[in-house]
């Protein structure tokens, strides 16, 4: 898919596009500067998924899980006892760290691929998992992302998503609104595009799936450059 198919607000080469949208971000400098920026503990979504699997066991055998935007692998490691995991991330620095950590921990059920998740083939999976990527995507990207999830999941497959809520404290009050996009802002600090979702919006976005759970979570996100207070949605859905 061409970048212009996803980026329906700014034409290629428009300087404005360089400051917003997932495909224009260079993630390596942040990982080189901060390393394991969110620490080694699993994210809110990973902890939620582990709790879900305790009450609703994964399919028999070793299900295949695709971790989209896996970063340096902290969630993949937490979930590696539940599934055979392929983590994909665009940052070579993060992927190198994930592979190194997997070797240190002796984890063989999680492997990692460096690449842009728009162009890397996803294959098929029993579970697709995505923590804190959806809110970085612009409208066309979000629609394409949902299509890619649907295409990758086997019938009955599960999808786990976390994304920032419209009630997220650091951004809801301070973000600069994007013209023509309800809920979309520019973070004034990092000049970063973010989309803050409502529950109704997520139900509409994922209407093709059976939504099993949709809940808001309030939490403190640890960061090496200062902890953040967030409110995020956690969504669990099943492909029909």
Image: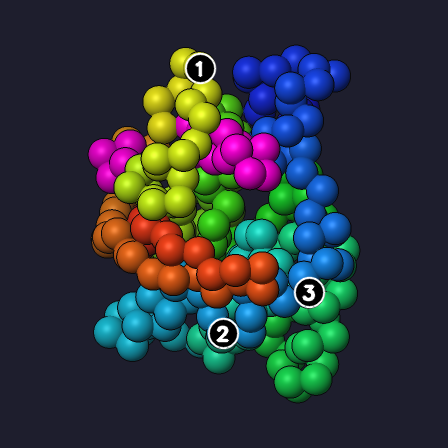
Q: Earlier in the sequence, mark 1 or mark 3?
A: 3
The circle drawn on residue 41 is 2
Front in this rendered view, residue 96 or 185: 185
The residue that label 3 is drawn on is: 35
In the image, what residue occupies the spot 23% across and 34% down?
200
Does the magenta segment cover residue 191?
Answer: yes
Secondary structure category for the residue under label 2 = loop
Q: CA distance from mark 1 to mark 3?
A: 35 Å
The colour scheme of the drawn protein is rainbow
In the image, what residue occupies the spot 74% across and 16% down?
13
The residue that label 1 is drawn on is: 179
Front in this rendered view, residue 238 or 6: 6
Range drawn in magenta: 184-202
In the image, what residue occupies the spot 28% across and 56% down?
217
Secondary structure category for the residue under label 3 = loop
**Quadrant (top left/top right/bottom left/bottom right) for the N terminus:** top right
- How many badges with numbers are in the image? 3
Front in this rendered view, residue 184 or 158: 184
Q: Residue 138 placed where, x, y %?
A: 50, 28
Does the magenta segment cover residue 8?
Answer: no
Dot 2: within a 10 Å radius of its alpha carbon, few (fewer than 14), some, or many (20 or more) residues?
Answer: few
């Amino acid at each position: 898919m061409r970048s212009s198919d996803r980026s329906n607000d700014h034409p290629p080469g428009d300087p404005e596009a360089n400051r917003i949208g997932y495909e224009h971000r260079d993630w390596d400098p942040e990982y080189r500067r901060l390393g394991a920026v969110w620490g080694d503990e699993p994210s809110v979504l990973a902890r939620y998924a582990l709790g879900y699997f305790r009450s609703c066991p994964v399919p028999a055998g070793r299900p295949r899980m695709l971790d989209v935007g896996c970063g340096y692998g902290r969630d993949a490691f937490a979930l590696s006892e539940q599934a055979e995991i392929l983590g994909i991330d665009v940052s070579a620095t993060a992927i190198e760290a994930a592979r190194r950590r997997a070797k240190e921990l002796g984890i063989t059920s999680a492997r990692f691929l460096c690449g842009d998740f728009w162009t890397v083939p996803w294959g098929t999976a029993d579970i697709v998992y995505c923590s804190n990527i959806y809110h970085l995507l612009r409208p066309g990207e979000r629609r394409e992302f949902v299509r890619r999830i649907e295409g990758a999941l086997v019938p009955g497959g599960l999808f786990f998503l976390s994304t920032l809520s419209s009630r997220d404290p650091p951004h809801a009050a301070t973000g600069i609104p994007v013209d023509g996009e309800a809920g979309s802002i520019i973070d004034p600090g990092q000049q970063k595009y973010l989309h803050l979702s409502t529950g109704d919006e997520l139900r509409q976005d994922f209407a093709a799936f059976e939504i099993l759970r949709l809940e808001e979570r309030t939490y403190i996100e640890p960061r090496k450059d200062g902890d953040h207070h967030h409110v995020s949605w956690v969504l669990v859905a099943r492909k029909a």
